[in-house]
Image (cartoon, rainbow, N blue to C red):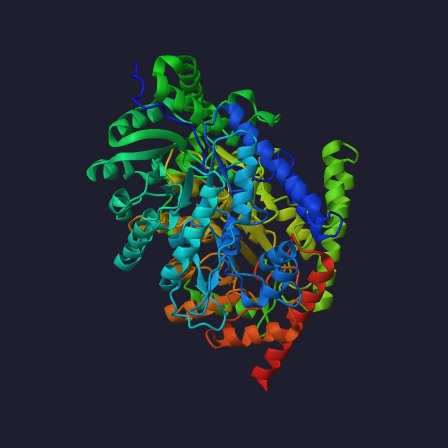
Amino acid sequence: MTTKPAAAAARATVYGYPRQGQDRELKKAIEGYWKGRVDADALRATAADLRRTNWHQLAEAGIDEVPTGDFSYYDHVLDTTVMVGAIPERHREAVAADPLAGYFAMARGTQEVAPLEMTKWFDTNYHYLVPELGPDTEFVADSAKQVAELREALALGLTARPVLVGPVTYLLLAKPAPGVAADFEPLTLLDRLLPVYAQVLADLRAAGAEWVQVDEPALVQDRTPAELNAAGRAYRDLGGLTDRPKLLVASYFDRLGDALPLLAKAPVEGLALDFTEAAAGNLDALAAVGGLPGKRLVAGVVSGRNIWVNDLGASLATLGTLLGLADRVDVAASCSLLHVPLDASVERDIEPQILRWLAFARQKTAEVVTLAKGLRHGTDAVSAELAANRADLASRATSPITRDPAVRARAAAVTDADARRSQTYPERTAAQRAHLGLPLLPTTTIGSFPQTGELRTARAALRAGRIDTAGYEERVKAEIQEVVSFQEKTGIDVLVHGEPERNDMVQYFAEQLTGYLATRHGWVQSYGTRYVRPPVLAGDISRPEPMTVRWTTYAQSLTDRPVKGMLTGPVTMLAWSFVRDDQPLGETARQVALALRDEVNDLEAAGTSVIQVDEPALRETLPLRAADRPGYLAWATEAFRLTTAGVRPDTQIHTHMCYAEFGDIVQAIDDLDADVISLEAARSHMQVARELAAHGYPREAGPGVYDIHSPRVPSTEEAAQLLRTGLAAIPAERLWVNPDCGLKTRGWPETRSSLENLVTAARRVRAELLA
C-alpha cells in the first residue's frame, strides 16, 4: 500500500544518545580523573570530543534536530540538582571549592561525607542520584552546562534542542533530606522551583534555542489529583512566560493517562509521546482528547529500550494515523537511546542472519530517519528500506533459533505444586538452624569480591590466546583461595567463593544457556562509570550443563563454614538482558526458571546448603501503572519459586535486591517464600527494615550496613548503629549482617577494612544483645 506524503515536512529527532563513546572513552577518562592520572581539563576535552562525535553521527545519519544537555559525567538527575542549585548542605563546601570534584563527591561520597542516595530510573536498569530537599531548600539557577552545550552544537551549524528533566518529575523523584520529616513532600516546593526553570529557559533562548524539551516521565505513573494539578499549574506558568523558547513536554516508558488531556490543553507548543507497545493506549487517548490542533507532536515509534529492528510498515501506519491529530508530526525513538548500545555493526561474533534482527542506537537513528522520510515523501520514497525490513522480520519469525519444542513442552507441563516448597517456613527454618549452626546476627556478603588486575589480565590473556584454559583456571583457583581465606580470618559466618570466573552476573549465565547471544561491544550505562553488556535473549532457554557447581564445590572444599551457591534469578535474567519481544515475558521467565531450577538442584546435590538466587530487578521491572502490576507479580514470583522450590527443607534459600524502592512490593517479597533476603539499606538509613516490619514480614532479612557504591569505608560504630536501627524493626533472631550489594567494583584495601568493621560491628551488637 502506498502512503501519501505528510502535509508538513516531518523531522527526525532523538531525545538522547549513549554517552560513553565507541570504546568507553568517557569511563576511562573519568576513572583516570578519580585516580589523578587525568586532569580536569583533559576530562572536559574528552567529554567535548564525545559530544561532537555524537552530534556529527546524528546529523550525518539524517537527524534534523539533535539533543543537547543529555550528556553527563555521571547522571542527568544529578546535573539537574546542580542546575537548580539544590546542593546538599554537606556537599556545599566541596562544590564551592571545586565544582567538578564536588559533583563527583555528591555521586560517590568521600571518606568524610556520604553521597546522595541512588536508585533506579523508573523501570530501567539506569540508576539516578536522588535529590535531597526540605522546607528550607532554596533553589538558584545555574544554566552554565545547558547553555554551553547548546552553544557547542550551534557552533557546528546544527539545529539543536536542549533537554531538561522537568520540574514536576524532579520533585517527584526527590526525597526529604536527612533530618527532614519523613512526611515532607518535595512537590510542595514547586512554586519555589518554577522561577528557576523560567530563568534557565530564558538563558537558553538567549543562547539560541528555538525549542527546549522538558522531560516529565513521572506523569506516566499513577498520580493523585493534587500531583496532576501541580503539573497543570507548572505548565500554565512556564507556558505563560514571554521570554522562553518553544516548549516540547516529553513523556515515555508508558501511557500518559490522566495527564494527557492536562498537557494537551497547556499553553505549550508541543508534546512528545511514546507510541510503542510499552505505551499502548496513547494513540486512542490522544484521539479522545481531540488531538493537538496547532501543536507539534513528536511520535516515539521506535523503541528506545530494546534492540530488535522496528517494524517500519507498522510504524508508518501509526504515523499516518497521527497525521490528523496534530499540526505537525515528527518522528523519534520512544525515549533516550541511552538505554541501548551504540552500534550493532561493530559486532563480529554474532551470525550475520541474527545481526539483521538487531538495532542499536545508530541503527535506531537510521530507522527514525527512514520513517521521517517515508512520512514526508510517502512510502514509495522508502520502498527499498521497507522491503529489506520485511525480509529481516520474516527471517526472525521463521528462524529455528527462536523455538525449541522440548523447552516449550517442559514449560507447558509445569504445575502449581512445582512452585511450592515441601514444608512451611517455620518448619524449614528450624531444620536450617539445626543444620547450619549459625550465631545470632550471622554475617555474610552478597556474592562477588573485587576483580583484581591480575584476574582481568588473565581473562584478557585467555581471550587473546596468550594462556590456555588450564592456566586461566589456576588463576581463578588462586583468587578463590584468597577470598575464602580472607573471609575465614575476618570471621564471616556464611562465605562466598567471590565469583572471580564471572564477567557479569547476567552475562556469565547467558553465555552458558541456549537461546542467549552475547555481544562484544554492546555496553550500556548502569550508573556513573559502571557499564554492562546486556546479553540478547533471542530464543527458547535451556541449560545444557551445570554452570556454577564446580567453583562453588571447590570453595567449599577449602573451608568447614557454609559457602553460598550464587545464581542470578529469572526476572533479573530478563530485566538485564535485551529480552525477546515475540512472546509474553511470563513465558520466557518460566523457561529461564526451569533452567535455573536444574542448577539449584545440582548445587544442593553437590553439598551446597545455602543457595542465593538474586532478584535485584524484581522491583525495577514492576509496571509503572498499578493496574498492570498484579499480572506481572504473579508470573515474576512464580518464576522465583519455580527456580527454588525443588530443594530440601534444610537447604536455605537466599535472595538479594538492591537500589530500588521496595515499599510497594513487600507483599511480593513475601510471596517469593525465600528463607533470607538481603537488601540495600545503608544510603536509605534502614528504610526497608521499617517497611518489612510494617508489613509483618515473617522471614529473615539482611538490610545492608555497608554502601558498596561509594569508596568510603564505614566505621565500626557506623555499621553498629545501622544494625541497632535495623533491630528496632527486625528481631535479632531474624536479622543478618551484610553489605548492600556485591563487591566486584570495589578495591581490596577498602573491602578488607569495610568487612572487618562490619564483622566487628556484628560482634559488638551481638554482645550487647547477649549481655
Looking at the picture, how far across and down is residue 140, in whole percent? 49, 59
Looking at the picture, how far across and down is residue 745, in whole percent? 65, 52
Q: Residue at x 29, y 21 (%)?
A: 7
Residue 355 located left or right of residue 383: right
Decide if residue 598 is in sight here.
no
Q: Quadrant of the C terminus?
A: bottom right
Q: How many numbered marks, from 0 up?
A: 0
Relative depth, front residue between 524 and 51: 51
Relative depth, front residue between 736 and 114: 114
Q: Residue at x 55, y 28 (%)?
A: 57
Looking at the picture, how far across and down is residue 516, in whole percent? 52, 34
Residue 174 located left or right of residue 446: left
Q: Residue at x 40, y 53 (%)?
A: 167
Q: Quadrant of the N terminus?
A: top left
Looking at the picture, how far across and down is residue 651, in whole percent? 53, 60
Residue lying furthest bottom in this view?
A: 771
Relative depth, front residue between 499 and 602: 499
Decide if residue 36 is in sight here.
yes
Q: Quadrant of residue 317?
A: top left
